[in-house]
Amino acid sequence: MHANTRIEPSSQSQVFLWIWAATLIVLPLMVWPSHETIGSVDSSTVALSSATGLIVYNPETSWLLPKVLFLAFISSIGILYIKDNWRGSLLEWLVAAYLLLATLSAFFSGDTFQYIFLGGNNRLDGLLYQYSVVSYMLVWYYLVLRIKERAFRFLIAALAIVGLVESAIVMAQRLGYDPVGYIVRMHSYTDYTVGTIGHPGMVAGLLLPIAVVSYVIFLYRRSYFYLFVALITAGAISLTYNKSSAYALIFTALLVPALNPRKIYRTALWATPLLIMAVLGTAHVVPNHMQEERSLTNMHTGKTRLLIWKLAADVALHTPGQPLIGAGPDGFKLQIIKQKRLDELIDTYRLEYRWNEKVTKVELLGDEETPLKDRAIHVSFAGRPIGRFFHVSLDRAHDLLLDRTIQAGLLAALITLYIYLVPILALLKHRDKYTMAFGAASFALVLYYVFWFPVPQVEPIHAAILAAAWAHLHEVHSPYTNETLAPTS
Protein backbone atom coordinates (compact mmCIF):
# COMPACT_ATOMS: atom_id res chain seq x y z
CA MET A 1 0.00 0.00 0.00
CA HIS A 2 1.30 3.49 -0.86
CA ALA A 3 2.70 5.40 2.11
CA ASN A 4 0.37 8.37 1.55
CA THR A 5 -2.69 6.15 1.57
CA ARG A 6 -1.72 3.90 4.47
CA ILE A 7 -4.55 3.40 6.94
CA GLU A 8 -3.61 4.22 10.54
CA PRO A 9 -3.85 1.25 12.89
CA SER A 10 -6.83 2.70 14.76
CA SER A 11 -8.78 3.29 11.53
CA GLN A 12 -7.76 -0.10 10.20
CA SER A 13 -8.96 -1.74 13.39
CA GLN A 14 -12.31 0.04 13.16
CA VAL A 15 -12.80 -1.22 9.60
CA PHE A 16 -11.92 -4.78 10.58
CA LEU A 17 -14.22 -4.58 13.59
CA TRP A 18 -17.20 -3.71 11.38
CA ILE A 19 -16.30 -6.47 8.93
CA TRP A 20 -15.72 -9.12 11.59
CA ALA A 21 -18.93 -8.26 13.44
CA ALA A 22 -20.86 -8.51 10.17
CA THR A 23 -19.27 -11.85 9.29
CA LEU A 24 -20.14 -13.25 12.71
CA ILE A 25 -23.79 -12.47 11.94
CA VAL A 26 -23.76 -13.67 8.34
CA LEU A 27 -21.62 -16.82 8.63
CA PRO A 28 -24.05 -19.11 10.51
CA LEU A 29 -26.96 -18.04 8.28
CA MET A 30 -25.37 -18.97 4.95
CA VAL A 31 -27.11 -21.82 3.11
CA TRP A 32 -27.14 -22.76 -0.54
CA PRO A 33 -30.03 -24.21 -2.58
CA SER A 34 -29.39 -27.78 -3.62
CA HIS A 35 -32.80 -29.15 -4.55
CA GLU A 36 -32.79 -29.83 -8.30
CA THR A 37 -31.91 -33.43 -9.14
CA ILE A 38 -30.47 -35.27 -12.10
CA GLY A 39 -31.55 -38.83 -11.49
CA SER A 40 -30.74 -39.23 -7.81
CA VAL A 41 -27.94 -36.65 -7.69
CA ASP A 42 -28.37 -32.95 -6.96
CA SER A 43 -27.59 -30.75 -9.95
CA SER A 44 -25.57 -28.30 -7.85
CA THR A 45 -23.44 -31.22 -6.68
CA VAL A 46 -22.90 -32.34 -10.27
CA ALA A 47 -21.97 -28.83 -11.37
CA LEU A 48 -19.55 -28.31 -8.47
CA SER A 49 -17.92 -31.71 -9.02
CA SER A 50 -17.50 -31.02 -12.75
CA ALA A 51 -15.99 -27.59 -12.13
CA THR A 52 -13.58 -28.55 -9.35
CA GLY A 53 -12.91 -32.24 -9.88
CA LEU A 54 -13.79 -32.82 -6.23
CA ILE A 55 -16.47 -35.17 -4.95
CA VAL A 56 -19.07 -33.30 -2.91
CA TYR A 57 -22.34 -34.28 -1.27
CA ASN A 58 -25.68 -32.58 -0.85
CA PRO A 59 -25.28 -31.60 2.85
CA GLU A 60 -21.92 -30.10 1.95
CA THR A 61 -23.33 -27.89 -0.80
CA SER A 62 -26.28 -26.84 1.37
CA TRP A 63 -24.92 -26.28 4.86
CA LEU A 64 -21.14 -26.49 4.85
CA LEU A 65 -19.52 -25.33 1.65
CA PRO A 66 -21.01 -21.80 1.65
CA LYS A 67 -19.82 -21.24 5.21
CA VAL A 68 -16.36 -22.74 4.72
CA LEU A 69 -15.65 -20.84 1.50
CA PHE A 70 -16.95 -17.59 3.00
CA LEU A 71 -14.82 -18.10 6.12
CA ALA A 72 -11.77 -18.90 3.98
CA PHE A 73 -12.28 -15.73 1.92
CA ILE A 74 -12.75 -13.51 4.97
CA SER A 75 -9.86 -15.10 6.83
CA SER A 76 -7.52 -14.57 3.89
CA ILE A 77 -8.22 -10.86 4.29
CA GLY A 78 -7.63 -11.22 8.01
CA ILE A 79 -4.06 -12.40 7.38
CA LEU A 80 -3.21 -8.79 6.46
CA TYR A 81 -4.37 -7.67 9.89
CA ILE A 82 -2.58 -10.52 11.65
CA LYS A 83 0.66 -9.67 9.87
CA ASP A 84 0.59 -6.12 11.22
CA ASN A 85 -0.42 -7.08 14.76
CA TRP A 86 1.50 -10.24 15.61
CA ARG A 87 2.70 -9.92 19.22
CA GLY A 88 4.14 -13.33 20.02
CA SER A 89 1.68 -13.84 22.89
CA LEU A 90 0.89 -17.19 24.43
CA LEU A 91 -2.39 -17.63 22.54
CA GLU A 92 -0.69 -16.90 19.21
CA TRP A 93 2.01 -19.51 19.80
CA LEU A 94 -0.56 -22.03 21.00
CA VAL A 95 -2.71 -21.79 17.87
CA ALA A 96 0.41 -21.75 15.68
CA ALA A 97 1.59 -24.97 17.35
CA TYR A 98 -1.87 -26.48 16.91
CA LEU A 99 -1.86 -25.65 13.19
CA LEU A 100 1.60 -27.18 12.78
CA LEU A 101 0.52 -30.41 14.47
CA ALA A 102 -2.75 -30.53 12.48
CA THR A 103 -0.83 -30.01 9.24
CA LEU A 104 1.71 -32.72 9.99
CA SER A 105 -1.06 -35.09 11.03
CA ALA A 106 -2.94 -34.47 7.80
CA PHE A 107 0.02 -34.99 5.49
CA PHE A 108 1.26 -38.10 7.31
CA SER A 109 -2.24 -39.63 7.46
CA GLY A 110 -1.93 -41.44 4.13
CA ASP A 111 -5.30 -40.02 3.08
CA THR A 112 -6.02 -38.49 -0.33
CA PHE A 113 -5.53 -34.79 -1.01
CA GLN A 114 -9.25 -34.05 -1.02
CA TYR A 115 -9.67 -35.35 2.54
CA ILE A 116 -6.51 -33.58 3.70
CA PHE A 117 -7.51 -30.23 2.22
CA LEU A 118 -11.31 -30.29 2.61
CA GLY A 119 -11.87 -32.88 5.33
CA GLY A 120 -14.20 -35.85 5.57
CA ASN A 121 -17.49 -36.27 3.76
CA ASN A 122 -20.15 -33.98 5.22
CA ARG A 123 -17.59 -32.36 7.56
CA LEU A 124 -15.33 -30.09 5.46
CA ASP A 125 -13.05 -29.42 8.44
CA GLY A 126 -9.78 -30.13 6.64
CA LEU A 127 -6.76 -27.87 6.48
CA LEU A 128 -8.57 -25.18 4.48
CA TYR A 129 -11.02 -24.76 7.33
CA GLN A 130 -8.45 -25.18 10.13
CA TYR A 131 -6.26 -22.36 8.83
CA SER A 132 -9.33 -20.19 8.21
CA VAL A 133 -10.83 -20.55 11.68
CA VAL A 134 -7.49 -19.84 13.39
CA SER A 135 -7.04 -16.71 11.26
CA TYR A 136 -10.58 -15.63 12.09
CA MET A 137 -9.93 -16.18 15.80
CA LEU A 138 -6.68 -14.20 15.82
CA VAL A 139 -8.30 -11.18 14.21
CA TRP A 140 -10.93 -11.11 16.95
CA TYR A 141 -8.12 -11.43 19.49
CA TYR A 142 -6.29 -8.39 18.12
CA LEU A 143 -9.48 -6.36 17.76
CA VAL A 144 -10.39 -6.81 21.41
CA LEU A 145 -6.83 -6.02 22.47
CA ARG A 146 -6.77 -2.79 20.48
CA ILE A 147 -10.32 -1.46 20.69
CA LYS A 148 -11.40 -3.06 23.95
CA GLU A 149 -14.84 -1.85 25.07
CA ARG A 150 -16.10 -1.04 21.58
CA ALA A 151 -14.99 -4.46 20.32
CA PHE A 152 -16.79 -6.14 23.21
CA ARG A 153 -19.97 -4.22 22.44
CA PHE A 154 -19.82 -5.16 18.76
CA LEU A 155 -19.14 -8.82 19.53
CA ILE A 156 -21.91 -9.12 22.13
CA ALA A 157 -24.41 -7.31 19.90
CA ALA A 158 -23.50 -9.54 16.94
CA LEU A 159 -23.96 -12.64 19.09
CA ALA A 160 -27.38 -11.36 20.20
CA ILE A 161 -28.47 -10.81 16.60
CA VAL A 162 -27.34 -14.29 15.57
CA GLY A 163 -29.14 -15.78 18.56
CA LEU A 164 -32.41 -14.00 17.84
CA VAL A 165 -32.42 -14.79 14.11
CA GLU A 166 -31.46 -18.45 14.56
CA SER A 167 -33.99 -18.86 17.37
CA ALA A 168 -36.72 -17.39 15.18
CA ILE A 169 -35.88 -19.87 12.42
CA VAL A 170 -35.89 -22.79 14.88
CA MET A 171 -39.24 -21.63 16.22
CA ALA A 172 -40.68 -21.35 12.69
CA GLN A 173 -39.49 -24.87 11.85
CA ARG A 174 -41.06 -26.20 15.02
CA LEU A 175 -44.38 -24.60 14.03
CA GLY A 176 -44.22 -26.03 10.51
CA TYR A 177 -43.11 -22.87 8.70
CA ASP A 178 -39.64 -23.66 7.46
CA PRO A 179 -38.06 -21.00 5.21
CA VAL A 180 -34.68 -22.78 5.20
CA GLY A 181 -36.05 -26.11 4.02
CA TYR A 182 -37.73 -24.49 1.04
CA ILE A 183 -34.47 -22.77 0.12
CA VAL A 184 -32.38 -25.92 0.46
CA ARG A 185 -34.64 -28.64 -0.90
CA MET A 186 -38.04 -27.12 -1.84
CA HIS A 187 -39.87 -28.58 1.17
CA SER A 188 -39.67 -28.18 4.93
CA TYR A 189 -37.78 -30.30 7.44
CA THR A 190 -40.33 -32.37 9.31
CA ASP A 191 -38.22 -34.66 11.52
CA TYR A 192 -36.48 -32.10 13.74
CA THR A 193 -35.36 -28.46 13.84
CA VAL A 194 -32.12 -27.85 11.96
CA GLY A 195 -32.00 -24.04 11.77
CA THR A 196 -29.47 -22.81 9.23
CA ILE A 197 -26.87 -25.24 10.61
CA GLY A 198 -28.21 -28.60 9.44
CA HIS A 199 -28.47 -30.53 12.70
CA PRO A 200 -30.36 -29.88 15.96
CA GLY A 201 -27.35 -30.67 18.16
CA MET A 202 -25.18 -28.25 16.22
CA VAL A 203 -27.86 -25.52 16.30
CA ALA A 204 -27.93 -25.94 20.07
CA GLY A 205 -24.14 -25.64 20.13
CA LEU A 206 -24.46 -22.30 18.35
CA LEU A 207 -27.14 -20.98 20.72
CA LEU A 208 -25.60 -22.21 23.98
CA PRO A 209 -22.77 -19.64 24.41
CA ILE A 210 -25.03 -16.86 23.12
CA ALA A 211 -27.57 -17.65 25.84
CA VAL A 212 -24.83 -17.67 28.49
CA VAL A 213 -23.17 -14.43 27.38
CA SER A 214 -26.52 -12.65 27.11
CA TYR A 215 -27.59 -13.92 30.54
CA VAL A 216 -24.41 -12.70 32.25
CA ILE A 217 -24.49 -9.33 30.49
CA PHE A 218 -28.06 -8.87 31.71
CA LEU A 219 -27.06 -9.68 35.29
CA TYR A 220 -24.32 -7.06 35.25
CA ARG A 221 -25.93 -4.35 33.09
CA ARG A 222 -29.59 -4.91 33.99
CA SER A 223 -30.38 -4.65 30.26
CA TYR A 224 -33.67 -6.43 29.67
CA PHE A 225 -32.88 -6.76 25.97
CA TYR A 226 -30.17 -9.28 26.85
CA LEU A 227 -32.51 -11.09 29.23
CA PHE A 228 -34.89 -11.39 26.29
CA VAL A 229 -32.09 -12.79 24.09
CA ALA A 230 -31.08 -15.26 26.80
CA LEU A 231 -34.65 -16.52 27.27
CA ILE A 232 -35.37 -16.77 23.54
CA THR A 233 -32.15 -18.66 22.80
CA ALA A 234 -32.72 -20.94 25.82
CA GLY A 235 -36.20 -21.66 24.47
CA ALA A 236 -34.79 -22.49 21.06
CA ILE A 237 -32.30 -24.90 22.68
CA SER A 238 -35.30 -26.58 24.30
CA LEU A 239 -36.85 -27.06 20.85
CA THR A 240 -33.74 -28.86 19.59
CA TYR A 241 -33.97 -31.41 22.42
CA ASN A 242 -30.18 -31.37 22.65
CA LYS A 243 -29.37 -32.65 26.12
CA SER A 244 -25.73 -31.55 26.13
CA SER A 245 -26.62 -27.90 25.56
CA ALA A 246 -29.69 -27.89 27.80
CA TYR A 247 -27.91 -29.29 30.83
CA ALA A 248 -24.76 -27.24 30.17
CA LEU A 249 -26.89 -24.10 30.17
CA ILE A 250 -28.59 -25.07 33.43
CA PHE A 251 -25.30 -25.85 35.23
CA THR A 252 -23.74 -22.62 33.97
CA ALA A 253 -26.75 -20.53 34.97
CA LEU A 254 -26.44 -21.91 38.50
CA LEU A 255 -22.66 -21.40 38.57
CA VAL A 256 -22.62 -17.71 37.64
CA PRO A 257 -24.49 -16.30 40.67
CA ALA A 258 -22.70 -18.78 42.94
CA LEU A 259 -19.36 -17.25 41.94
CA ASN A 260 -20.49 -13.68 42.58
CA PRO A 261 -23.48 -13.70 44.94
CA ARG A 262 -23.20 -10.18 46.39
CA LYS A 263 -23.23 -8.20 43.15
CA ILE A 264 -25.89 -10.07 41.19
CA TYR A 265 -27.60 -12.27 43.75
CA ARG A 266 -30.96 -10.47 43.90
CA THR A 267 -31.32 -10.30 40.14
CA ALA A 268 -30.15 -13.89 39.65
CA LEU A 269 -32.62 -15.06 42.28
CA TRP A 270 -35.51 -14.59 39.84
CA ALA A 271 -33.69 -14.53 36.46
CA THR A 272 -32.00 -17.92 36.84
CA PRO A 273 -35.27 -19.83 37.41
CA LEU A 274 -36.71 -18.07 34.33
CA LEU A 275 -33.78 -19.23 32.22
CA ILE A 276 -34.04 -22.79 33.50
CA MET A 277 -37.80 -22.81 32.88
CA ALA A 278 -37.20 -21.59 29.33
CA VAL A 279 -34.75 -24.37 28.48
CA LEU A 280 -36.78 -27.11 30.18
CA GLY A 281 -40.32 -25.97 29.44
CA THR A 282 -40.47 -24.32 26.02
CA ALA A 283 -40.70 -27.64 24.17
CA HIS A 284 -43.77 -28.50 26.25
CA VAL A 285 -45.53 -25.21 25.48
CA VAL A 286 -44.84 -24.56 21.78
CA PRO A 287 -46.96 -26.68 19.39
CA ASN A 288 -44.93 -29.42 17.76
CA HIS A 289 -45.20 -30.05 14.00
CA MET A 290 -42.11 -32.26 13.95
CA GLN A 291 -42.65 -35.97 13.30
CA GLU A 292 -39.80 -37.36 15.37
CA GLU A 293 -40.46 -37.84 19.09
CA ARG A 294 -37.55 -36.55 21.17
CA SER A 295 -36.95 -35.91 24.86
CA LEU A 296 -34.41 -34.33 27.20
CA THR A 297 -34.63 -37.38 29.47
CA ASN A 298 -33.93 -40.13 26.92
CA MET A 299 -30.45 -41.48 27.74
CA HIS A 300 -30.17 -43.87 24.77
CA THR A 301 -27.65 -41.66 22.94
CA GLY A 302 -25.57 -41.48 26.13
CA LYS A 303 -25.18 -45.26 26.14
CA THR A 304 -24.06 -45.16 22.51
CA ARG A 305 -21.54 -42.45 23.38
CA LEU A 306 -19.87 -44.75 25.91
CA LEU A 307 -19.22 -47.37 23.24
CA ILE A 308 -17.97 -44.74 20.79
CA TRP A 309 -15.62 -43.27 23.40
CA LYS A 310 -14.15 -46.69 24.15
CA LEU A 311 -13.62 -47.35 20.44
CA ALA A 312 -12.12 -43.87 19.95
CA ALA A 313 -9.73 -44.28 22.88
CA ASP A 314 -8.51 -47.61 21.47
CA VAL A 315 -8.08 -46.06 18.03
CA ALA A 316 -6.17 -43.08 19.45
CA LEU A 317 -3.82 -45.27 21.49
CA HIS A 318 -2.89 -47.32 18.43
CA THR A 319 -2.58 -44.48 15.92
CA PRO A 320 1.00 -44.12 14.61
CA GLY A 321 2.67 -40.86 15.64
CA GLN A 322 0.88 -40.29 18.93
CA PRO A 323 1.11 -38.15 20.98
CA LEU A 324 2.73 -35.67 18.60
CA ILE A 325 0.62 -36.26 15.50
CA GLY A 326 -2.73 -37.86 14.79
CA ALA A 327 -4.50 -39.51 11.88
CA GLY A 328 -5.67 -36.45 9.94
CA PRO A 329 -9.05 -34.73 9.42
CA ASP A 330 -10.89 -37.95 8.53
CA GLY A 331 -8.62 -40.13 10.62
CA PHE A 332 -11.18 -41.82 12.87
CA LYS A 333 -12.93 -43.47 9.96
CA LEU A 334 -9.64 -44.37 8.28
CA GLN A 335 -8.09 -45.85 11.44
CA ILE A 336 -11.16 -47.94 12.26
CA ILE A 337 -10.59 -49.72 8.96
CA LYS A 338 -6.78 -49.84 9.14
CA GLN A 339 -6.83 -51.19 12.70
CA LYS A 340 -9.63 -53.66 11.78
CA ARG A 341 -11.94 -52.57 14.59
CA LEU A 342 -15.06 -53.59 12.72
CA ASP A 343 -16.55 -55.71 15.52
CA GLU A 344 -16.38 -52.74 17.91
CA LEU A 345 -17.90 -50.52 15.23
CA ILE A 346 -20.80 -52.90 14.71
CA ASP A 347 -21.38 -52.94 18.48
CA THR A 348 -22.08 -49.21 18.31
CA TYR A 349 -24.38 -49.71 15.31
CA ARG A 350 -26.26 -52.48 17.12
CA LEU A 351 -26.99 -50.21 20.08
CA GLU A 352 -27.68 -47.08 18.03
CA TYR A 353 -30.13 -48.79 15.65
CA ARG A 354 -31.53 -51.22 18.26
CA TRP A 355 -30.74 -54.43 16.41
CA ASN A 356 -32.26 -57.50 18.02
CA GLU A 357 -30.60 -60.09 15.77
CA LYS A 358 -27.37 -61.79 16.76
CA VAL A 359 -24.39 -60.78 14.63
CA THR A 360 -22.43 -63.84 13.48
CA LYS A 361 -19.82 -62.38 11.14
CA VAL A 362 -18.39 -59.00 10.12
CA GLU A 363 -16.15 -58.72 7.06
CA LEU A 364 -14.64 -55.94 4.98
CA LEU A 365 -15.27 -56.29 1.24
CA GLY A 366 -13.25 -54.98 -1.70
CA ASP A 367 -9.85 -55.66 -3.22
CA GLU A 368 -6.55 -53.89 -2.57
CA GLU A 369 -7.19 -51.37 -5.35
CA THR A 370 -10.39 -50.14 -3.71
CA PRO A 371 -9.73 -47.17 -1.38
CA LEU A 372 -10.21 -48.21 2.23
CA LYS A 373 -13.03 -45.78 2.97
CA ASP A 374 -14.89 -46.90 -0.16
CA ARG A 375 -15.00 -50.53 0.91
CA ALA A 376 -18.25 -51.97 2.19
CA ILE A 377 -18.78 -53.94 5.40
CA HIS A 378 -20.92 -57.07 5.22
CA VAL A 379 -22.69 -58.05 8.45
CA SER A 380 -24.19 -61.54 8.76
CA PHE A 381 -27.00 -62.27 11.21
CA ALA A 382 -28.09 -65.57 12.77
CA GLY A 383 -31.10 -67.05 11.02
CA ARG A 384 -30.93 -64.67 8.05
CA PRO A 385 -29.64 -65.89 4.68
CA ILE A 386 -28.79 -62.38 3.52
CA GLY A 387 -26.93 -59.89 5.70
CA ARG A 388 -26.61 -56.13 5.54
CA PHE A 389 -24.07 -53.93 3.80
CA PHE A 390 -22.62 -50.77 5.34
CA HIS A 391 -19.90 -48.22 4.83
CA VAL A 392 -17.97 -46.93 7.83
CA SER A 393 -19.97 -43.83 8.68
CA LEU A 394 -18.69 -43.25 12.22
CA ASP A 395 -16.18 -40.45 11.77
CA ARG A 396 -16.29 -38.58 15.10
CA ALA A 397 -15.84 -39.66 18.71
CA HIS A 398 -18.37 -37.06 19.91
CA ASP A 399 -15.93 -35.72 22.47
CA LEU A 400 -13.63 -32.75 21.87
CA LEU A 401 -10.55 -34.24 23.54
CA LEU A 402 -10.88 -37.62 21.84
CA ASP A 403 -11.65 -36.16 18.42
CA ARG A 404 -8.73 -33.74 18.53
CA THR A 405 -6.42 -36.53 19.75
CA ILE A 406 -7.37 -38.78 16.85
CA GLN A 407 -7.20 -36.01 14.26
CA ALA A 408 -4.11 -34.05 15.31
CA GLY A 409 -2.53 -35.88 18.23
CA LEU A 410 -2.75 -35.73 22.01
CA LEU A 411 -0.56 -32.62 22.23
CA ALA A 412 -2.88 -30.72 19.89
CA ALA A 413 -5.85 -31.90 21.96
CA LEU A 414 -4.24 -30.62 25.16
CA ILE A 415 -3.54 -27.27 23.49
CA THR A 416 -7.20 -27.01 22.52
CA LEU A 417 -8.33 -27.93 26.03
CA TYR A 418 -5.95 -25.39 27.58
CA ILE A 419 -7.35 -22.62 25.38
CA TYR A 420 -10.83 -23.43 26.71
CA LEU A 421 -9.77 -23.84 30.35
CA VAL A 422 -7.86 -20.58 30.82
CA PRO A 423 -10.98 -18.33 30.67
CA ILE A 424 -12.69 -20.74 33.11
CA LEU A 425 -9.78 -20.62 35.57
CA ALA A 426 -9.92 -16.83 35.40
CA LEU A 427 -13.39 -17.01 36.97
CA LEU A 428 -11.74 -18.07 40.23
CA LYS A 429 -9.93 -14.74 40.52
CA HIS A 430 -11.84 -12.07 38.57
CA ARG A 431 -15.48 -11.03 38.82
CA ASP A 432 -15.92 -8.34 36.15
CA LYS A 433 -18.69 -8.77 33.59
CA TYR A 434 -16.51 -9.74 30.63
CA THR A 435 -14.50 -12.35 32.53
CA MET A 436 -17.76 -13.77 33.86
CA ALA A 437 -19.56 -13.66 30.48
CA PHE A 438 -16.85 -15.26 28.36
CA GLY A 439 -15.50 -17.51 31.11
CA ALA A 440 -18.98 -18.86 31.78
CA ALA A 441 -19.52 -19.37 28.03
CA SER A 442 -16.25 -21.32 27.88
CA PHE A 443 -17.42 -23.45 30.81
CA ALA A 444 -20.71 -24.19 29.06
CA LEU A 445 -18.88 -25.10 25.85
CA VAL A 446 -16.54 -27.50 27.68
CA LEU A 447 -19.61 -29.27 29.08
CA TYR A 448 -21.17 -29.34 25.61
CA TYR A 449 -18.00 -30.68 23.99
CA VAL A 450 -17.84 -33.64 26.36
CA PHE A 451 -20.54 -35.08 24.08
CA TRP A 452 -19.93 -33.16 20.82
CA PHE A 453 -17.23 -32.07 18.41
CA PRO A 454 -16.41 -28.78 16.62
CA VAL A 455 -18.05 -28.19 13.22
CA PRO A 456 -17.45 -25.39 10.68
CA GLN A 457 -21.04 -24.17 10.99
CA VAL A 458 -20.54 -23.26 14.65
CA GLU A 459 -16.90 -23.34 15.77
CA PRO A 460 -15.98 -19.88 14.37
CA ILE A 461 -18.50 -18.37 16.80
CA HIS A 462 -16.89 -20.28 19.66
CA ALA A 463 -13.45 -19.17 18.46
CA ALA A 464 -14.53 -15.51 18.57
CA ILE A 465 -15.72 -15.93 22.16
CA LEU A 466 -12.47 -17.61 23.21
CA ALA A 467 -10.43 -14.90 21.48
CA ALA A 468 -12.32 -12.18 23.37
CA ALA A 469 -11.84 -14.04 26.65
CA TRP A 470 -8.08 -14.35 26.16
CA ALA A 471 -7.69 -10.74 25.04
CA HIS A 472 -9.58 -9.55 28.10
CA LEU A 473 -7.29 -11.51 30.40
CA HIS A 474 -4.45 -9.22 29.35
CA GLU A 475 -6.34 -6.28 30.79
CA VAL A 476 -6.95 -7.99 34.14
CA HIS A 477 -3.39 -9.44 34.25
CA SER A 478 -4.37 -13.08 34.49
CA PRO A 479 -1.55 -15.29 35.79
CA TYR A 480 -2.68 -18.04 33.42
CA THR A 481 -1.53 -16.13 30.32
CA ASN A 482 1.93 -15.51 31.82
CA GLU A 483 2.18 -12.01 30.35
CA THR A 484 1.05 -8.41 30.69
CA LEU A 485 0.47 -6.10 27.74
CA ALA A 486 0.57 -2.34 27.91
CA PRO A 487 -2.71 -0.63 26.93
CA THR A 488 -3.06 -0.01 23.19
CA SER A 489 -5.36 2.37 21.42
Image (spheres, rainbow, N blue to C red):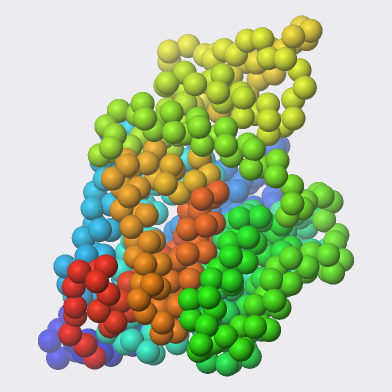
Q: Position of residue 310 (x, y in %)?
A: 50, 32
The picture quadrant where one finds residue 267 is bottom right
Q: Nearer the viewer, residue 348 or 99?
A: 348
Q: Is residue 433 left or right of residue 193?
A: left
Q: Quadrant of the N terminus?
A: bottom left
Q: Position of residue 282 (x, y in %)?
A: 78, 69
Q: Is residue 101 left or right of residue 463?
A: left
Q: Is residue 263 left or right of residue 11?
A: right
The picture quadrant where one finds residue 432 is bottom left
The image shows residue 486, relative to residue 232, as above or below, that is below
Q: Position of residue 187 (x, y in %)?
A: 78, 56
What residue is shown at x 57% (from left), y 12% (from top)?
Answer: 363
The image shows residue 197, relative to residue 263, as above or below, that is above
* Badge count: 0
What residue is shown at x 52% (from left), y 57% (from top)?
Answer: 447
Q: Is residue 338 left or right of residue 49?
A: left
Res 267 visible:
yes
Res 466 visible:
no
What residue is shown at x 80% (from left), y 54% (from top)?
Answer: 190
Q: Nearer the viewer, residue 289 or 240?
A: 240
What residue is shown at x 74% (from left), y 65% (from top)?
Answer: 280
The image shows residue 447, relative to residue 474, as above or below, that is above
Q: Nearer the viewer, residue 250 or 292?
A: 250
Q: Nearer the viewer, residue 11 or 338?
A: 338
Q: Position of residue 483 (x, y in %)?
A: 18, 73
Q: Quadrant of the C terminus?
A: bottom left
